[in-house]
Amino acid sequence: MAILKVARLGHPVLRQVAPPIKPESIQEAETQRLIDDMIETMREYDGVGIAAPQVHVSKQIAVIEAKGSRRYPDAPDIHLTVLINLEVTPLGPELGDDWEGCLSLNDFRGLTPRYQQVRAKALDREGRPVEFVATGFHARVLQHERDHLLGKVFIDRMPSFETLSYLAEFTRYWSR
Ligand code: NI
């Protein structure tokens, strides 16, 4: 496994719409290696999710996991989930605000509205369909990663940049 270089805001790959993966190519060694490397990279940089465009690969793959994250100490645990061709559908109109960050905008946090409850549909790393409902932080992470597959980043979802903060200032003035 390898730790991959993370694309930072400004790299065009983050703004491309990633094409879906052909189900028959999921089992290929190259895809499986990419998934392993994405997991390793997410853990190395203490992220709670990473999408393939963030490691310079424009494909619809995301991995998420939260377990005692230093970057998100208040986060509930999310078990490791590999999401290929991820679709996220809101279940209800309620939006909630919370602070969001991103390994591609590593130094920033910003208050970002997200749907409170969503349904996720994807394929796992064996190509089997997975479908589940997520709420709160888990739903937020799914919407964030789905956005990466659409060429979007969290600041695109912020209605105002008044809360956009460097991490040190966020920790000093905004975090509880
Ligand atoms: Ni991100």
Image: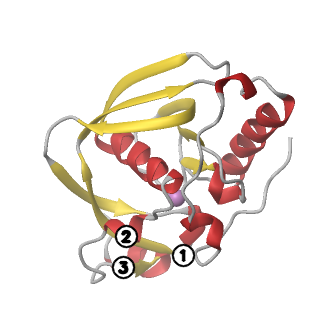
Q: Which mark is residue 156?
A: 2
Q: Does the residue at mark 1 contact the one at mark 2 (Cβ under 8 Å)?
A: no
Residue 167 at least partly seen:
yes
Residue at the spot x=46%, y=64% of the render? 153
Image position of 75 (left or right of 42) = left
Name the residue carrying label 1. Answer: 107
Crowdedness near tag 2: few (<14), some (14–19) or many (≥20) residues, C-alpha within 10 Å: few
Q: Secondary structure at mark 3?
A: loop
User: Splitting the image into 4 quarters, where does residue 35 fall?
Assistant: top right
Earlier in the chain: of badge 3 and badge 2, it is: 2
Earlier in the chain: of badge 1 and badge 2, it is: 1
The x, y position of residue 170, in whole percent, is: 39, 75
Image position of 145 (left or right of 120) = right
For the residue pair 35 and 76, the one nearer the viewer reads as 35
Locate the N terminus by quadrant: top right
For the residue pair 78 and 139, the one nearer the viewer reads as 139
- Amino acid type at circle 2 is Asp
Residue at the spot x=65%, y=74% of the render? 11
Name the residue carrying label 3. Answer: 164
